Image (cartoon, rainbow, N blue to C red):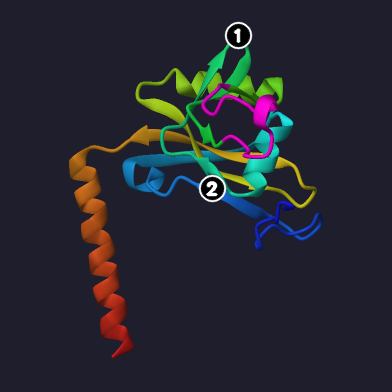
Amino acid sequence: MAHQPKPNTEPKGKGKVVVATHRKARHDYFVQDTLEAGISLVGSEVKSLRDGKADLLAGFATIHNNQAWLHDVHIRPYEYAHAFNHEPRRKRRLLLHKREIAKLFGKVQLKGMTLIPLSMYFNARGKVKVELGLCQGKHTVDKRETLKKKDADREAHRALAR
């Protein structure tokens, strides 16, 4: 039986096709800045991503020896690759310019700053990209304030709708 692609996978030239998002990132972190990075993958990883089999929840990025690396992003093994499959949680190299890496390294050295993958997607040219966020962790009090603000905004919209 032939493998059927996922229905939302669009051919090249149609725009951005999101594979995975880190939905709790904006709840758990203050996102200071975002940037797009390429990622070095093997063939079975790309095929698994086309099926939408990725998890960014535990993922983070580091900078080591002037290279950016993505850790703990789970890309499920491609079921038809068998013996030539990849390791699901291996560290993957991020493709960034040296200037971008140097700028990020300076910002990550600040207290409490970390690089979190916010989403993974195929761009219009069919290349896999990762949206990285330069983030600072939120405390529980900050999370409560954010929820209170959302509730107040929701109530205001309801009042205006009436």
Residue 26: x %, y % from top left: 39, 47
Q: Main secondary structure of the magenta part?
A: loop
Quadrant in the rendering for residue 104: top right
Q: Residue 84 at x, y = what percent?
A: 70, 26
Name the residue: 33% across, 87% down. 161
Task: Depth check: give the residue in front, 67 or 100.
Answer: 67
Asked whether residue 95 appears in the rendered view, the answer is no
Coordinates of residue 22 in the picture (x, y in percent): 45, 45
Look at the numbered discs 1 and 2 and tell me whether their residues touch, using CB distance below 8 Å: no
Residue labelled with disc 1: 65
N-terminal of the two: label 1 or label 2?
2
| Closer-to-camera residue (124/152) | 124
**Mark 1 → mark 2, Cα distance in angstroms:** 28 Å
Please state, as top left, top right, bottom left or bottom right, where the C terminus lies in the image: bottom left
Total label count?
2
Q: Secondary structure at mark 1?
A: loop
Q: Nearer the viewer, residue 60 or 144?
A: 60
In the rendered view, does 98 fall on the left or right side of 71? right
- Mark 1 Cα shell of 10 Å, populated few (<14), some (14-19), many (≥20): few
Q: Is residue 108 left or right of residue 144?
A: right
- Circle 2: residue type: Ala
User: Which residue type does callout 1 highlight?
Assistant: Asn
Q: Which residues are magenta?
A: 77-91
The residue at which mark 2 appears reads as: 20
Q: Position of residue 98 (x, y in %)?
A: 69, 20
